[in-house]
Image: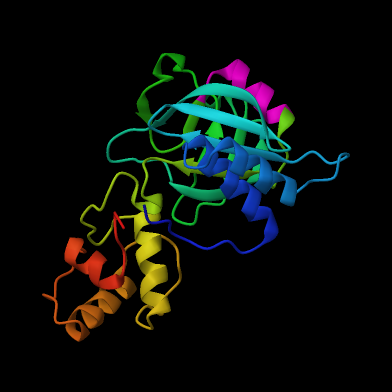
Amino acid sequence: MALFGTLRDKRLVWLTIIFMAVLGLFTSTFLFQAIQANKIKDDEKEYLIIINIQEKKLFLFENKKHIKTYPIASGKPGWPSPIGHWQIVEKGTWGKGFGGRWMGLNVPWGKYGIHGTTRESSIGRAASHGCIRMYNKDVRELYKIVPIGTHVIIENGPFGPFGTGFKPLKPGDRGADVLAVQRRLKELGYFKGRENGIYEDDLKYALYKFQKDNNLPVKHTITREDYHAMGFREFE
Protein backbone atom coordinates (compact mmCIF):
# COMPACT_ATOMS: atom_id res chain seq x y z
CA MET A 1 0.00 0.00 0.00
CA ALA A 2 1.26 3.46 -0.85
CA LEU A 3 1.54 5.97 1.97
CA PHE A 4 1.07 9.62 1.05
CA GLY A 5 2.74 12.59 2.74
CA THR A 6 5.97 12.92 4.68
CA LEU A 7 7.00 12.91 8.33
CA ARG A 8 8.36 16.36 9.19
CA ASP A 9 9.34 16.02 12.82
CA LYS A 10 9.87 13.46 15.54
CA ARG A 11 6.44 14.01 17.05
CA LEU A 12 4.78 12.87 13.83
CA VAL A 13 6.70 9.60 14.07
CA TRP A 14 4.72 8.33 17.04
CA LEU A 15 1.47 9.76 15.68
CA THR A 16 1.91 7.76 12.50
CA ILE A 17 3.04 4.68 14.41
CA ILE A 18 -0.18 4.63 16.42
CA PHE A 19 -2.22 5.33 13.30
CA MET A 20 -0.68 2.35 11.52
CA ALA A 21 -1.19 0.17 14.58
CA VAL A 22 -4.90 0.99 14.65
CA LEU A 23 -5.08 -0.06 10.99
CA GLY A 24 -3.38 -3.33 11.91
CA LEU A 25 -0.32 -2.67 9.77
CA PHE A 26 2.31 -3.00 12.49
CA THR A 27 2.85 -5.85 14.94
CA SER A 28 2.66 -5.22 18.66
CA THR A 29 6.43 -5.88 18.91
CA PHE A 30 7.21 -3.25 16.32
CA LEU A 31 4.87 -0.77 18.01
CA PHE A 32 6.56 -1.32 21.40
CA GLN A 33 10.04 -0.84 19.92
CA ALA A 34 8.99 2.31 18.07
CA ILE A 35 7.34 3.84 21.11
CA GLN A 36 10.43 3.12 23.24
CA ALA A 37 12.46 5.07 20.69
CA ASN A 38 10.11 8.06 20.86
CA LYS A 39 9.40 8.38 24.59
CA ILE A 40 7.49 11.27 26.11
CA LYS A 41 8.55 12.55 29.51
CA ASP A 42 6.61 11.00 32.39
CA ASP A 43 5.24 14.34 33.58
CA GLU A 44 3.83 15.30 30.17
CA LYS A 45 0.39 14.48 28.80
CA GLU A 46 0.04 14.42 25.08
CA TYR A 47 -3.17 13.51 23.32
CA LEU A 48 -3.98 12.11 19.91
CA ILE A 49 -7.39 11.63 18.31
CA ILE A 50 -7.87 9.10 15.51
CA ILE A 51 -11.24 9.09 13.75
CA ASN A 52 -12.17 6.11 11.61
CA ILE A 53 -14.96 7.15 9.26
CA GLN A 54 -15.83 3.62 8.15
CA GLU A 55 -16.17 2.37 11.72
CA LYS A 56 -17.85 5.62 12.88
CA LYS A 57 -15.58 5.74 15.92
CA LEU A 58 -13.26 8.26 17.57
CA PHE A 59 -10.25 6.83 19.42
CA LEU A 60 -8.55 8.96 22.08
CA PHE A 61 -4.94 8.30 23.08
CA GLU A 62 -3.08 9.74 26.07
CA ASN A 63 0.73 9.43 25.91
CA LYS A 64 0.32 6.73 23.21
CA LYS A 65 -2.14 4.72 25.33
CA HIS A 66 -5.68 4.21 24.08
CA ILE A 67 -7.99 5.50 26.82
CA LYS A 68 -11.40 6.12 25.21
CA THR A 69 -13.53 5.14 22.23
CA TYR A 70 -16.55 7.24 21.25
CA PRO A 71 -19.18 6.65 18.54
CA ILE A 72 -19.51 9.45 15.99
CA ALA A 73 -21.46 10.60 12.94
CA SER A 74 -19.51 11.62 9.85
CA GLY A 75 -20.15 13.50 6.62
CA LYS A 76 -22.97 12.35 4.36
CA PRO A 77 -22.56 11.68 0.61
CA GLY A 78 -21.51 14.88 -1.12
CA TRP A 79 -20.28 16.34 2.19
CA PRO A 80 -17.34 14.12 3.19
CA SER A 81 -15.46 14.55 6.42
CA PRO A 82 -11.93 15.89 5.83
CA ILE A 83 -9.42 13.05 5.51
CA GLY A 84 -5.98 13.96 6.77
CA HIS A 85 -3.81 14.97 9.69
CA TRP A 86 -5.12 18.08 11.45
CA GLN A 87 -4.94 19.91 14.75
CA ILE A 88 -7.54 21.41 17.06
CA VAL A 89 -7.02 25.14 16.62
CA GLU A 90 -10.03 26.53 18.47
CA LYS A 91 -12.45 25.54 21.19
CA GLY A 92 -15.74 27.16 22.07
CA THR A 93 -18.97 26.64 23.98
CA TRP A 94 -21.18 27.00 20.94
CA GLY A 95 -24.97 26.83 21.10
CA LYS A 96 -27.51 24.06 21.43
CA GLY A 97 -27.22 22.96 17.80
CA PHE A 98 -23.60 21.99 18.49
CA GLY A 99 -24.30 20.38 21.84
CA GLY A 100 -22.65 23.33 23.56
CA ARG A 101 -19.13 22.31 22.55
CA TRP A 102 -17.03 22.95 19.43
CA MET A 103 -13.44 21.93 18.62
CA GLY A 104 -12.38 23.44 15.31
CA LEU A 105 -9.79 21.88 12.99
CA ASN A 106 -7.27 23.61 10.73
CA VAL A 107 -8.72 22.26 7.49
CA PRO A 108 -7.83 24.72 4.68
CA TRP A 109 -10.87 24.18 2.42
CA GLY A 110 -13.67 24.82 4.92
CA LYS A 111 -14.79 25.05 8.53
CA TYR A 112 -14.84 21.61 10.11
CA GLY A 113 -14.82 20.51 13.70
CA ILE A 114 -15.86 18.04 16.38
CA HIS A 115 -19.09 18.95 18.16
CA GLY A 116 -22.29 17.73 19.75
CA THR A 117 -25.72 17.69 18.15
CA THR A 118 -29.46 18.00 18.70
CA ARG A 119 -29.84 14.96 16.44
CA GLU A 120 -28.21 12.28 18.53
CA SER A 121 -30.05 9.61 16.53
CA SER A 122 -27.62 10.42 13.70
CA ILE A 123 -24.65 9.06 15.66
CA GLY A 124 -23.28 5.96 13.93
CA ARG A 125 -24.32 7.17 10.48
CA ALA A 126 -23.06 9.37 7.64
CA ALA A 127 -25.27 12.34 8.39
CA SER A 128 -23.37 15.61 8.83
CA HIS A 129 -22.08 18.29 6.46
CA GLY A 130 -18.55 16.98 7.05
CA CYS A 131 -18.09 17.71 10.74
CA ILE A 132 -17.67 14.98 13.34
CA ARG A 133 -20.74 14.72 15.56
CA MET A 134 -20.70 13.14 18.99
CA TYR A 135 -23.21 12.47 21.74
CA ASN A 136 -23.44 15.62 23.82
CA LYS A 137 -22.23 13.90 27.00
CA ASP A 138 -19.24 12.51 25.09
CA VAL A 139 -18.24 15.78 23.45
CA ARG A 140 -18.39 17.57 26.80
CA GLU A 141 -16.04 14.94 28.26
CA LEU A 142 -13.64 15.12 25.31
CA TYR A 143 -13.70 18.93 25.39
CA LYS A 144 -12.45 18.89 28.97
CA ILE A 145 -9.63 16.46 28.20
CA VAL A 146 -7.96 17.66 25.00
CA PRO A 147 -6.25 21.04 24.63
CA ILE A 148 -5.86 23.28 21.61
CA GLY A 149 -3.03 21.86 19.51
CA THR A 150 -4.16 18.23 19.86
CA HIS A 151 -3.44 16.24 16.70
CA VAL A 152 -6.44 14.71 14.91
CA ILE A 153 -6.08 12.02 12.23
CA ILE A 154 -9.18 11.33 10.13
CA GLU A 155 -8.99 8.30 7.87
CA ASN A 156 -11.51 6.70 5.54
CA GLY A 157 -9.84 3.84 3.74
CA PRO A 158 -6.35 2.52 3.05
CA PHE A 159 -5.22 5.12 0.50
CA GLY A 160 -4.45 8.17 2.58
CA PRO A 161 -6.03 11.34 1.11
CA PHE A 162 -7.70 9.21 -1.59
CA GLY A 163 -9.70 7.20 0.95
CA THR A 164 -11.01 4.02 -0.65
CA GLY A 165 -9.55 4.85 -4.08
CA PHE A 166 -9.23 7.44 -6.84
CA LYS A 167 -12.30 9.40 -7.84
CA PRO A 168 -12.61 11.85 -10.75
CA LEU A 169 -12.03 15.44 -9.66
CA LYS A 170 -13.57 18.43 -11.38
CA PRO A 171 -13.50 22.21 -10.83
CA GLY A 172 -15.28 23.16 -7.63
CA ASP A 173 -14.39 19.94 -5.82
CA ARG A 174 -12.63 20.22 -2.49
CA GLY A 175 -10.98 17.79 -0.14
CA ALA A 176 -7.87 15.88 0.81
CA ASP A 177 -7.52 14.39 -2.68
CA VAL A 178 -7.50 17.86 -4.28
CA LEU A 179 -4.91 18.98 -1.74
CA ALA A 180 -2.71 15.97 -2.58
CA VAL A 181 -2.89 16.80 -6.30
CA GLN A 182 -2.01 20.46 -5.64
CA ARG A 183 1.02 19.42 -3.62
CA ARG A 184 2.21 16.92 -6.23
CA LEU A 185 1.84 19.36 -9.12
CA LYS A 186 3.68 21.97 -7.06
CA GLU A 187 6.52 19.49 -6.46
CA LEU A 188 6.62 18.90 -10.23
CA GLY A 189 6.77 22.64 -10.93
CA TYR A 190 3.30 23.12 -12.42
CA PHE A 191 1.07 24.46 -9.65
CA LYS A 192 1.88 27.95 -8.40
CA GLY A 193 -1.22 28.65 -6.32
CA ARG A 194 -2.11 28.22 -2.66
CA GLU A 195 -2.44 24.68 -1.33
CA ASN A 196 -6.01 24.90 -0.03
CA GLY A 197 -7.70 21.69 -1.18
CA ILE A 198 -10.07 23.56 -3.55
CA TYR A 199 -10.08 22.85 -7.30
CA GLU A 200 -10.04 26.36 -8.75
CA ASP A 201 -8.74 27.92 -11.98
CA ASP A 202 -5.10 27.92 -10.85
CA LEU A 203 -5.19 24.13 -10.50
CA LYS A 204 -7.03 23.73 -13.81
CA TYR A 205 -4.35 25.65 -15.71
CA ALA A 206 -1.58 23.68 -14.00
CA LEU A 207 -3.36 20.45 -14.93
CA TYR A 208 -3.68 21.50 -18.59
CA LYS A 209 0.07 22.14 -18.84
CA PHE A 210 0.90 18.89 -17.05
CA GLN A 211 -1.38 16.92 -19.38
CA LYS A 212 0.15 18.53 -22.50
CA ASP A 213 3.69 17.82 -21.34
CA ASN A 214 2.83 14.19 -20.62
CA ASN A 215 0.87 13.51 -23.83
CA LEU A 216 -2.40 13.08 -21.96
CA PRO A 217 -5.83 14.19 -23.16
CA VAL A 218 -6.28 17.81 -22.08
CA LYS A 219 -9.42 18.02 -19.95
CA HIS A 220 -10.50 19.64 -16.72
CA THR A 221 -11.47 16.38 -15.01
CA ILE A 222 -8.64 14.61 -13.17
CA THR A 223 -8.90 10.89 -13.96
CA ARG A 224 -7.00 7.73 -13.13
CA GLU A 225 -4.51 8.20 -15.97
CA ASP A 226 -3.70 11.67 -14.65
CA TYR A 227 -3.19 10.32 -11.13
CA HIS A 228 -0.86 7.63 -12.47
CA ALA A 229 1.13 10.14 -14.53
CA MET A 230 1.59 12.21 -11.36
CA GLY A 231 3.06 9.17 -9.64
CA PHE A 232 0.10 8.23 -7.45
CA ARG A 233 -0.78 4.55 -7.07
CA GLU A 234 -3.55 2.81 -5.18
CA PHE A 235 -1.43 -0.32 -4.92
CA GLU A 236 2.28 -1.03 -5.00
* Front residue of 51 and 195: 51
Q: What range is drawn magenta here?
A: 134-144
Q: Quadrant of residue 67?
A: top right
Which residue is most to the left? 217
- Residue 141 within the magenta-colored segment of the rendering: yes
State the image coordinates of residue 227 (x, y, percent, origin top left): 25, 65
* Colouring of the image: rainbow
Left or right of 234: which side holds 140?
right
Residue at 35% x, 56% y is 177
Q: Is residue 187 above or below residue 226?
A: below
State the image coordinates of residue 81 (x, y, percent, origin top left): 41, 40
Q: Quadrant of residue 4?
A: bottom left
Residue at 24% x, 58% y is 169
State the image coordinates of residue 188 (x, y, percent, origin top left): 37, 80
- Is any part of residue 152 visible from this angle? yes
* Front residue of 94 and 188: 188
Residue at 73% x, 38% y is 63
Left or right of 135: which side holds 145?
right
State the image coordinates of residue 219 (x, y, percent, origin top left): 14, 71
- Location of the C terminus (image quadrant): bottom left
Which residue is most to the front? 29
* Dominant secondary structure of the residues highlighted in magenta in the image: helix
- Residue 182 within the magenta-colored segment of the rendering: no
Total numbered labels placed on residues in the image: 0
- Is any part of residue 38 visible from this angle? no
Which residue is most to the top? 121
Residue at 34% x, 81% y is 190
